[in-house]
Image (spheres, rainbow, N blue to C red):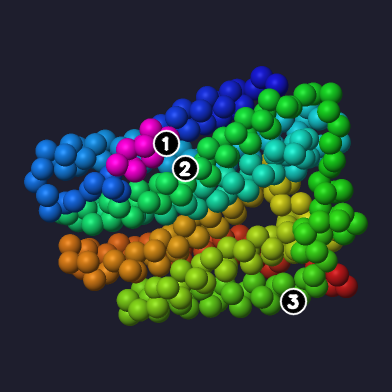
Amino acid sequence: MIFHPSIIALYVASLLVSFMISYSAYYGIQILRKWDIESGSELQLVLERRTYLISTILTYLFVFQLISLFLYIYTAEQLHVLFVGAMCAAGTLYVNTCGYPALILKMVTFLLAGLWLILNYADNKAYDYPLTKRKYLLLLIITPLLLTETALQTAFFLRLRPDLITSCCGTLFSTGSKNVISEVFSLPSMQVKIAFYLCMASTVASGIHFYRKGKGGYLFSSMSIIMFFVSIIATISFISLYFYELPTHHCPFCLLQKEYGYIGYLLYLTLFGSTVFGIGTGALMPFRNVKSLTTILPSIQRRLTLLSLILLVIFSAIATYPMVFYDFTLEGY
């Protein structure tokens, strides 16, 4: 294992998060089985006090979980100088078989943790906590994913050694590599551009419609999810090329380097943030008819929609900037 401040911080924090979320999930099962807000029993009073404590703990844990995705990528980026062949975080994550699976799980738990925070916020606004069982059910879904993520991350760090040789991003993200990613950037850039901007326009239009009319929340949420995947494909296929001003360099990790102004962090933060708020808007739709939430949810959803749209516009502006103001073009590619 390589001793690095970021590795130690992630390792210790992930173990603490895993322990606390397991503790919370244990009591979450009791809450799912025995929660009855209309009961005045001593057990219900105990559960109400306990759920308040657990919700507070989980709020801090899931906020850290949001941060840990970017800390994990930052750590991988910092470590690439230790491995022969690595030019960025792409090479570090390829050092062993646990790097990329841990990253994918971190992306999934980022979205789910953000959704849990939204449900918890809405639940705490109502006098009778009507979403308590739903948010603890979601907790039970998140728990095994987060524990698996912790195991993969731990295995990844423990198996790092400076004498290991890895592949550079030029090899991993090239048309000659035999993986799904190579199929992505082999797509004609113009077709991906059209799909990207059509999807972006559709998502913004559906968001504005919901913000103004309060209708179409499911559509906006679905478009946010589609936009997320299309944006990931677009980043690999053509967005990154304009920042690098190279027609063959598709790496999504080099954008995180100083040479490119660390623009990748802002790019990915706005994309993930927009997606979380968009999903949250749709996730609250089934509860709009709950009596204690009738007057609360519409305003919460409008704020979520507005935040999602703002972040999406920022993401799109960052992605479009080099296409407009740089001399580089992709003609012929």
Disc 3 target residue: 191
> Mark 2 falls on what kind of element?
helix
Left or right of 125 on screen, residue 278 = right
In the image, residue 164 lies at what x, y percent?
A: 83, 28
Q: How many marks?
A: 3
Please say if the residues under marks 1 and 2 sit with CB atoms less than 8 Å apart.
yes
Q: Is residue 333 visible?
A: yes
Spatial CA distance of label 1 from label 2 is 7 Å
> Mark 3 falls on what kind of element?
helix
Task: Residue 27: say if magenta.
Answer: yes
Front tag of 3 and 1: 1
Disc 1 target residue: 21
Q: Amino acid at mark 3?
A: Gln
Q: Amino acid at mark 1?
A: Ile
In the image, residue 127 lies at what x, y percent?
A: 15, 54
- Residue range in magenta is 21-30
On screen, residue 130 above or below 1: below
Q: Amino acid at mark 2?
A: Thr
Left or right of 176 on screen, residue 78 = left
Res 320 → quadrant: bottom right
Numbered label attached to residue 234: none
Badge 1 or badge 2: first in the primary sequence? 1
Front tag of 2 and 3: 2
On screen, residue 65 above or below 212: above
Spatial CA distance of label 3 from label 1 is 43 Å
| Residue positioned 69% across, 64% down in the render | 234
